[in-house]
Image: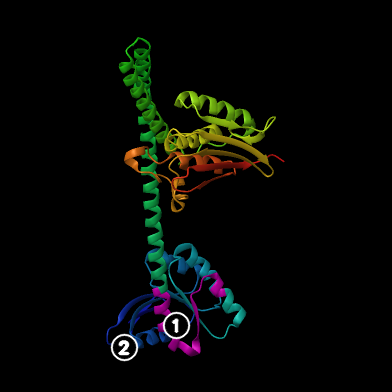
Amino acid sequence: MRVLVDGQSIRATVVTAEPTPLALLSVEDSADDVELIARELARNGLMPEVRQVQTSEEMARALHEQHWDAICMDYQMPRFDALRALKVRGDLAPDTPVIIISGYIGETAAVALLKAGADDYIPKHNLARLAPALRRAMRDVGDRRARRQMEEERARLVKQLADALELRDEFLILASHELRTPLTALRLQVESAVRISGGHDALKKRLSAADQQIEQIARLIEDMITVSKLGSPEPIRPEETDLGRLVDELARSFSVAERLDALTVDLPTGPTVALVDPMQMEDALRRILNNAAKYGGDQPIEVRLECGAPWIRISVTDHGIGIAAENHERIFERFGRAGPTRNYGGLGLGLWIARQIVEAHGGTVGVVSQLGEGATFTVSVPAPP
């Protein structure tokens, strides 16, 4: 054991079974107390290398020069005190554990020291507690350091994952946009071929089927772009919108595009105004209509708009294969499906995207259905006051 007191090194040896080296900084004005502390630690299986300091300058210099396993400090000294010493420790070595060793200082002062960052308080007349307290404080510091390193590593991995996801989304958006150009050109060529096919019904039928497949690919591309953008969604730009007109025009254009003869719309008399983003709300409703046409077979589809404070509700009913009760929530999950993939295809994103859009408006999307009895999807958005 070596003790540095007033610039001089003092060595004292105490035989222990397996002594543990300990670099100890002692903020103390009494050389006798420093040596007493060193001997007490040596008797308890520690081999301290102790350096005594008495001022803030000396303490700062010691902390700059080397790493210390622990700091012991007196509460009050002629030119220094524990509260100022704790501030120096906090600025230069915040992870180093601190044990206050002093005479009776009172409960209020002890609490103030613990709040200021001290790990424990040991009365000078009870130094038998010092070694266990030091070991516990150093173990706690080690645990905190390990937890902090784990948190830093976790934060690094989270950032790395976020960067990778951002790069993936950028690639998906770029690739999707690049696919649009040749796909649009191909569709124009197919439409042109249909116009000049004349009376060749078989050829016209094949070209029509090809056009439907191109439309399906276009929808998948749009879904890829939408999913990529949902990582940092575009802000909702609400405006006063007549949902009756929006639903009516959407139903008409959808019927023509999908060649549906049995799509009916039930609207209230007069305008039904809501504060929504019309483009995004139309996108959500179109996706629900796509789902109804996809799983409804050739059965009729009914669209109904109802207004009753505090909600405006738009329902889409099909009479297709229906949805089992255990799948009612799953179909709104990303890539969630209820029907067999080989028969219906798609990425399983349409209803998920629709729900994201509606919930961004402060609304809800739900379904009522039984297997084999069709389904009714209901979009509810807040009605204006």
User: Taking 17 as reference, is 29 above or below it?
Assistant: above
- Identify which residue, 180 or 375, lies in the foreground: 375
| Circle 2 residue | 14
Q: Determine the secondary structure under disc 2.
A: loop
Check disc 2 and give the amino acid type.
Val
Q: Position of residue 72 (x, y in %)?
A: 45, 77
| Circle 1 residue | 31
Give whichever of discs 1 and 2 has the lower sequence position: 2
Q: Nearer the viewer, mark 1 or mark 2?
A: 2
Please tell me whether the stretch drawn in magenta is mainly helix, strand or loop. helix
Judge the density around disc 1: few (<14), some (14-19), many (≥20) Cα neighbours within 10 Å: some
Q: Residue at x 36, y 34 (%)?
A: 171
Query: Where residue 219 is drawn, which disc sits there?
Result: none
User: Residue 294 is drawn in which quadrant?
Assistant: top left
Q: Which residues are magenta?
A: 113-139
Check disc 1 and give the amino acid type.
Ala
Question: Quick check: can you spot residue 3?
Answer: yes
Q: Residue at x 62, y 28 (%)?
A: 245
Q: Determine the secondary structure under disc 1.
A: helix
**Color style of the picture:** rainbow
Residue 118 highlighted magenta (yes or no):
yes
